[in-house]
Amino acid sequence: MPTACLNQPNLRVHLKGDRLEVYGRDESRESETLLREIPLRDLDRLIMSDSVHFTSPALAAILRKGIPIQVFSWAGQFLGGFLPAQNHHGLSRLSQYRRTLDAEFALQMSGRIVIAKLYNQRRVIQRLAASRNYDLGPVNSDLQTKQTAEATDPKPEVRNHNSEIRNTLQWLDALFAPTRNSKSIDELRGYEGVSTARYFQTWSGFLPADFPFERRSTRPPLNPVNACISFCSTVLYNEAVCFLHAHGLDPALGLLHTTENGRWSLALDLMEPFRPVLVEALALDLFSHQILSAGHFEPGNGGVYLNEEGRKKFFLQYERRMERQFLSESVGHRTTLRQQLEQQALMFKAALEHPEKFEPFLMN
């Protein structure tokens, strides 16, 4: 159990020996009872809602084991967390501060991140089309072939989406060269912005009709799809923050994302290639396979948010995806998305001295 998610309201967590005891209300008995025992040796991280209560010995034992804690509000807003005491890695951070101000280094690292995200966006669209048996042949096929395809596919919306997919893949292909030749980070941000807009336009065509997605909305998310994407992004973002802290880096010092007060910009940088692979791919699965329905969302603060039951279902699928092993073609061995996210922090740290060692995550 790498991650424990304490999502039920008003849980109480105690320490007993080398395990946590989680108490809460049992509706069938209408009383408080022991709901779960969690051995500390099996725990890597803990996610909790803002109404969970910890005893001081339980909290100290968690931190002593080096387990980070993330606290979320009912609306999925990250409120803060607890991090185990770490060596402050002063020399590494001094090197990071210098490198962050090095324009050539910043452009080089940012360029690799944007290219990786662009590549992963393209692969996600390719794999979605292949899994749903879309025809990705040449756009300008001869008239007879086109007429035959239309005769066997009577649905114009399918034909239109099929054509859009092919056009988007070709458009993304053409974007690699100018992105690689970018002369400034502002130019890179422009290419990242237009590629993401085009990608979402095509990606949304794979969603069920009951869950339309016209555009990305964040603060607040205005529909269930945006709510799911935002919540997943927040969880991933805070995992990246924890890994950066754990390896002695300052998560606030960004390159592609400018360094600003109030956000962990380097975490935003390193998670960019994971957005298509994890955030959007997971959201699509949750809606396409009817794991999430309209009943798993509720209105609040002018937006739409996952409710308690929705978050339970989300975390189960999130953990499965983060811990699922796969053979990575880019690294040449079996790994998981979570291991690759941590590896990004390690490679970035190594790149402070040897820039060639930073290779952003690429999906198969």
Image: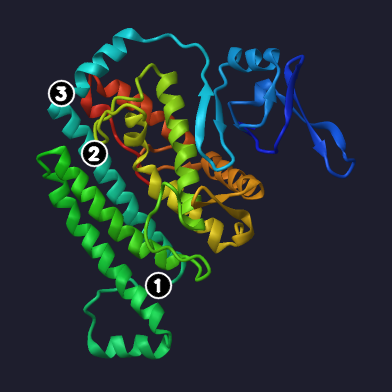
Instruction: Say the numbered circle drawn on residue 112.
Output: 2
The amino acid on which the numbered mark 1 sits, given as a three-letter code, is Tyr
The amino acid on which the numbered mark 2 sits, given as a three-letter code, is Arg
Q: Say above or below: 183 vs 263.
A: below
The amino acid on which the numbered mark 3 sits, given as a three-letter code, is Asp
* Left or right: residue 118 compared with residue 43: left
Please give the residue where the numbered disc 1 appears in the rendered image.
134
Please give the residue where the numbered disc 3 appears in the rendered image.
102
* Left or right: residue 154 compared with residue 106: right
Is 139 or 25 nearer to us in this picture?
25
Q: Where is residue 318 in the image (x, y as percent from the top left)?
A: 55, 44
Q: Position of residue 235 (x, y in %)?
A: 49, 38
Determine the secondary structure under disc 3.
loop
* Left or right: residue 91 compared with residue 328: left
Pointer 2 and pointer 1: residues touching (CB < 8 Å)?
no
**Number of residues whose C-alpha sits closer than 10 Å to that of mark 2, classed few (under 14), some (14–19) or many (20 or more):** some
